[in-house]
Structures are given as C-alpha cells and as structure tokens.
Image: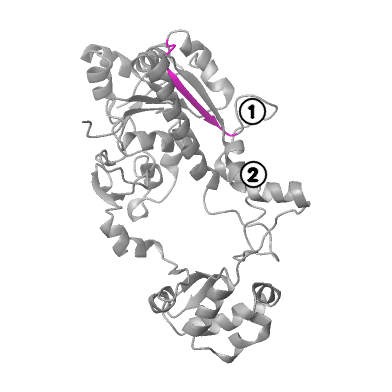
Amino acid sequence: MRKNLFEGLKVAEFAWVIVGPSTSRYLAEHGATVIKIESHLRPETLRYLSPYPEGKPGLNKSMYYGKFNSNKYSISLNLNHSKGKEIAWKLIMWCDIMTESFTPEVMTKWGLDYDSVSKFRSDIIYLSTCMQGKTGPRSRVPGYGTMLTGLAGFDEITGWPDRSPSPPWDAYTDAICPRFNVAGVLAALEYRRRTGKGQWIEQSQYESSLHFAAPLIMDYFSNNRVATRKGNRLDYASPHGVFPCAGDDRWIALAVFNDEQWKSLCHAMGQPAWCLDAKFATLCDRKKNEDELESSLAEWTSPLTAPEIESILQKVGIPCNMVEKAQDLFEDEQLKHRKFFTWLEHSENGLMPYEPQSTYIMSKTPREISRPSPCLGEHNEYVLKKILGYTDEDISNFIADGVIMF
C-alpha cells in the first residue's frame, strides 16, 4: 500500500504566483515530487510579498510564498538561454504533469507550449491556468486575482450599501480556481491510466470564478435583479451578521434562518421586551426593521465576551462563533486537535508554521507536510545531478553561462 496517494507522480511546475503553485501543492502534500522552475532573473512575484518573520523582507523570507510552496523542490533557470531550455526539456521528459500560468505567448516563445510538448510527449498532462483562458479577445491581458475579483463581480457585492465596493480580502479567485484544476488533473490521470494518452487542461480563472456567483447570475437572468452590496445581511436570514462583544475589537458572528431559531434566541437573551415586539415576529418583519433589530441585539452582545455568547447560543441551536483574530488560530483547540499547523525549520526563517492546502484528511493516505518552502534555486544541485543526471562539470558550465544561480 502506498503511504501517500500520489507517491511516484512527477510534476514540473512552470507556474507562479498562486493558482498554479496552489494546485501542485495539493499533489505535493499527498506524495507527488514537484519541481518548481523559477527564474533568478525575474523571481516569483510572491517572494517579494509580506508577511516576513520579524518584518524583515528578503527574497527567501516571504511566508506568503511559503504557504503555496512547501514540499517542493526549487530550481532557478534562465529559460531565455538555450541551455536553460535544454534543462527544461529534460524536466518535461521526466514529468507526468506540467503546469504553467502565463499569457499564451510566453510558453510559445520558449517553445514549451502544449502543441510543441505533445509532439514528444503524447502522454503528458499539461495544465494551463491563466486569467481569461488561452483564446479570445482578452486572452493576452495579464493580471492577478485581485483584478479578477472585480471582473467577476465579487467587488460589487462586497461591502456596505452606502459605500463604494470593498474587494474581498486577498485575491479571492485564486482561492477558488485550484480546486477546479486539481479535479481536472485527477480526471486526466484516470484518462491516461485507461488510454495511455495525456491531454491539455486549459483553465480560464475568470470562468471558473463565475461558478461561485451562479445564484446571482441566475437571479438576474430570471428576475432582472442586479446584485449589489448588503454588508453582512442575507435576504433569507435575520439577524445575520457580526456583533460587538466585550474586549478589544471582539465580535460574534451569528445567523437566524427561521422563526424557531428567533424564538430560541429571544429565550436565550432572557426575553427582553424589545424582542417580543410584533415588528420582529417573522422573518419578513425582521427584514423590514433590520436596523433597529441589529442595534438592540448589539446592546445585548456588547457586555458579554464572545466565548460566553458562543456557549449560550450554541446550546439552543443558534449558529454562532466568535470572530477569531490571527493569533487566536494558533490557540484554537479544534485546530490543535486536528494538527492543522505543521512547524518546520526553514533555512532562513527558522521555525515556521505551515498549514495544509488540502483541508481534508484521507484515512489510508493522509496528507504530509515534510519540507518547508524552498529558497530560490535551493535544489539546483539535487535536481540537476540526482534527477536529471548532469555532472559537476555540467553544473559549473551552467553557472558560468548564467543558466542557473547558486
């Protein structure tokens, strides 16, 4: 029996930033060997982004980069050099899966596009994931998920109705798209197992993201309603939102979806006079008087701590949880029990926490985070000698020619 689900699977990752690296990270923590092809002439974007330990920036210090690249090997390669392309082709001939996340002309310029690769590797599984796909009038428009949240409409529905759009934290679409990619890769692996043939998986991150706006799109199609910002409110629940608690910037999130839950909430609060008012009797009534409802509820929550409110309301079946800050997560008893964080020694950052990309546990082939995120080109020698069979003399020549960097 395999210890890891993808033990023996080999991935050459030409992708960068989040979606492509996040996809192969799923495979890596289930046993796949992932070699990340980076450039010392134009380093990976995330290597420049915070957070950094102790707030000190550095090319190898970003834990933003670290989140998506643990369990991987890093090789620095100049793909504009003929010898760099030679090494890239050796990696392509070695791997089962090849990933890239550039606009269409980039891989074509290097001669590493699917049409070129598939002539020599008919069994290759080639994943292309980019902003808006490889074809169409906007296929060559570069960008990041922070742009796609706007294009896909998420910015329009996030924030308060009396204020301008407030984009979701971070690049929301980058969190969505890897799930589709992994499903596509698994389907392609099964197809290759049955037929011996590979295929090209071509993802438009824009189109994948629209899947999560499907109810709003269908509402427009069916009822001509245009979704917009509603703060924390929900059409079919009230109260629904976050409310202040005792302490420094402490909050509780709660939701009441039906009249029975509303009665339970009133009982848990001790039946204050305001909650017995007919203006709050039904969901429709509560939606009509939501400002007053939320103000009165906040008066009840404010003197209590979030854990106290959790204890009171969860006992009577009201969905609620405290709003945790980043530091709370490391003390969260549920996450500790599930061994959510893995602490690994990074060569420049010291002991650092890594969280799983696959937030599920498989009983027979559990996930494993065994190596920290790599420094740039950290595994040049290992990959070139142990995997690709180059000699010390070859490597010396590569360094002298600027093909690789140590």
| Mark 1 or mark 2, earlier in chain | 1
Query: Going by the picture, which residue comes out furthest to the front?
Result: 260
Residue placed most toward the observer, 329 or 27: 27
Query: Going by the picture, which residue comes out furthest to the top?
Result: 119
Find the magenta span and give its range.
Answer: 121-131
Q: Is residue 39 left or right of residue 290?
A: left
Tag 1 near tag 2, CB within 8 Å: no
Residue placed most toward the observer, 317 or 286: 317
Residue 361 in view (yes/no): yes
Q: Estimate the x, y position of residue 76 in percent, counting from the top left.
A: 36, 26
Q: Estimate the x, y position of residue 16 in percent, counting from the top left.
A: 45, 33
How dense is the environment of label 1, judged by Cα within 10 Å: few (below 14), some, or many (20 and up)? some
Q: For residue 86, which quarter of the picture?
A: top left
Instruction: State the SS at label 1.
Output: loop
The type of residue carrying mark 1 is Ser
Q: How is the image coloured?
A: one colour
Task: Tell me if residue 355 comes above or below residue 187 in the rendering.
Answer: below
Q: Write down the residue under mark 2.
A: 152
Which mark is nearer the camera, 1 or 2? 2
Task: Tell me if residue 200 comes above or below residue 274 in the rendering.
Answer: above
Q: Is residue 150 left or right of residue 79?
A: right
Q: Write down the residue under mark 1.
A: 139
The type of residue carrying mark 2 is Ala
